[in-house]
Image (spheres, helix red, strand yellow):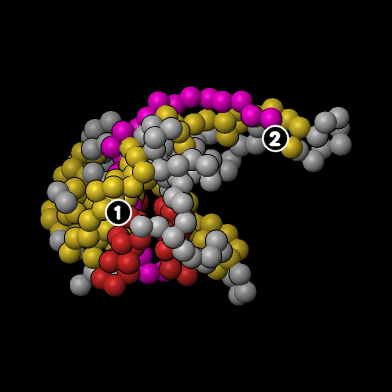
Amino acid sequence: MGKIVSARLTVPFWCSFRMPYTINVHFSYPVPPPVTLYGLIGCALGLPADFFDLLLEVNIAVGLEEGGEIIETYSRIIKRDPRTPDRRTLLIRQKLLQPVYRLYLRTGEELAEAVAQRLTDPVYPLALGESDDLVEVDQVSVFSEEKAIVDEIDSILPADLGLEPTSECITSYLPIAFIRGKRDWTGVEYRSYYVGKNIVVNQKTEAYIAGGKRVVF
């Protein structure tokens, strides 16, 4: 039987999870995408930056506990454009002030215990979003797999499950995995999710229970 790791992620300052669809304005996803959380787990375990094989062994979800205030900052970045004299351009970057999330990781017992241990004693410093966006990790627990039939979800909810939210939420198209080619990773896989603090749905569905939270992977 598998295990579920749960951990609270508190951002003491700000963070940003850039959407790759724009250039001069960097909008942020409302929650850290699964691939971002995988990077957090990789840092905790001390994995190489380009090691993605562990993605095949885990399911990752995230819960939104406090969304944080959205602000827009201005940054000057280097841009390789000969028409710009100083090779710099001004861009707007969206940031989230002091949000709180909850990480959920479903995997085998041995890996779950290793992740839980390293989230409290990481190999590398943990950040969420950009490398200098520090994150505080606490309330780390490991739960045995338990399922229940529910009509409220405490994690992001995949939009392709055929469930319709009846409570306030938004839809976000999140990167969830990397696509492997013959020799290397060649692309990114996306999935649409409903995002909200507590998502009420129009019909009952099966969810995992982790510390009283109802989670769908």
Q: Where is residue 212 in the image (x, y as percent from the top left)?
A: 14, 49
Above or below, comparing residue 173 to residue 84 in the picture: below
List the residue tagged with mark 2.
77
Which residue does the image show at 52% across and 30% down from the upper left?
A: 94
Q: Magenta stretch containing residue 61, yes or no?
A: yes
List the residue tagged with mark 1.
104
Q: Position of residue 80 (x, y in %)?
A: 79, 41
Q: In this view, does 78 lie to the left or right of 27?
A: right
Q: Which of these two is toward me, 190 or 126?
A: 126
- Dot 2 surroundings within 10 Å: few (below 14), some, or many (20 or more)? few
The residue range painted magenta reads: 56-76
Above or below, comparing residue 173 to residue 216 in the picture: above
The span from disc 2 to disc 1 (Cα, nearest Å) is 35 Å
Above or below, comparing residue 47 to residue 194 in the picture: below
Q: Where is residue 49 in the image (x, y as percent from the top left)?
A: 55, 61
What is the three-letter code of the residue carrying label 1?
A: Tyr
Which residue does the image show at 48% across and 65% down from the upper left?
A: 47
Quarter of the image with the N terminus in it = bottom left
Q: Where is residue 197 in the image (x, y as percent from the top left)?
A: 27, 36
What is the three-letter code of the residue carrying label 2?
A: Ile
Q: Which of these two is toward me, 27 or 170?
A: 27
Residue 154 quadrant? top left
Residue 145 quadrant? bottom left
